[in-house]
Image (tube, grey):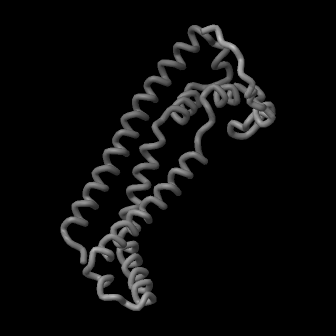
Amino acid sequence: MFDLSLYILGGVFVLFILASLSRWAIAVRGLTQEATEEYQTRCAEKPASVRGVSQDEFVRLFVTSFQPRWTLYAAAAAAAAIVVSPAALLAVPALYDVIWRANGAPDWGGRTGYVFMFSLFFGVVFIWAALAAFIARLHHLRAPEPFNHALARARGEPIEDTGWRPRPKWARKIKIDTADTETDS
């Protein structure tokens, strides 16, 4: 059942994972250097902006806020697809057989027909998409605090914790005026 094309696909996924992780590592290294320079510039020009914040903590906050987290999550999604694919390639045909037999096992719907191939392909793609959606949800739920807020918190300034971008009360009550108004055009 497993032929060379699956190994090639797995190899492409592994290359994608390595490229994503390399992109992240290169970006973090550049951000670390940039954060060090930014800290030194702020110490010289705007010392109040980094008062009470060590260079290591500043670099950590800077990198955490600006690193390309999507590369880590993309690599995780590809790795999850590789790990889940063998189980998916066993579960989807098994489910297809159950549905096929429940419908009376017509000749046109056996394991050699286009219906089976269609079901197998899109069943596996659906499982991959479900994994990617779950990992994308984790990416959005675990978004870091904006850099300016994190820096202010590190300086000890109180920042009210309102949650992540709640909609303002006035925006819930706003009504669109449908009356025609004249414009200056």
- Is 143 left or right of 169, judged from the image as shown? left
Query: Residue 120: image x %, image y %?
Result: 34, 72
Rendered-image quadrant of the C terminus: top right
Q: Quadrant of residue 104?
A: bottom left
Q: Quadrant of residue 26?
A: top left
Front residue of 4 and 178 = 178
- Is 73 left or right of 183, judged from the image as shown? left
At horizontal 26% and vertical 55% (from top left) the residue drawn is: 12
Above or below, comparing residue 66 to residue 21 in the picture: above
At horizontal 40% and vertical 51% (from top left) the residue drawn is: 75
Front residue of 19 and 108 = 108
Seen from this angle, which residue lies furthest left? 4
Above or below, comparing residue 183 to residue 112 in the picture: above
Above or below, comparing residue 81 to residue 95 in the picture: above
Query: Residue 149: image x %, image y %?
Result: 67, 29
Query: Residue 79: image x %, image y %?
Result: 39, 58
Q: How many marks?
A: 0
Rendered-image quadrant of the N terminus: bottom left
- Is 74 left or right of 22, judged from the image as shown? right
Query: Residue 84: image x %, image y %?
Result: 41, 68
At horizontal 71% and vertical 21% (from top left) the residue drawn is: 180
Above or below, comparing residue 104 to residue 132 in the picture: below
At horizontal 67% and vertical 19% (from top left) the residue drawn is: 51
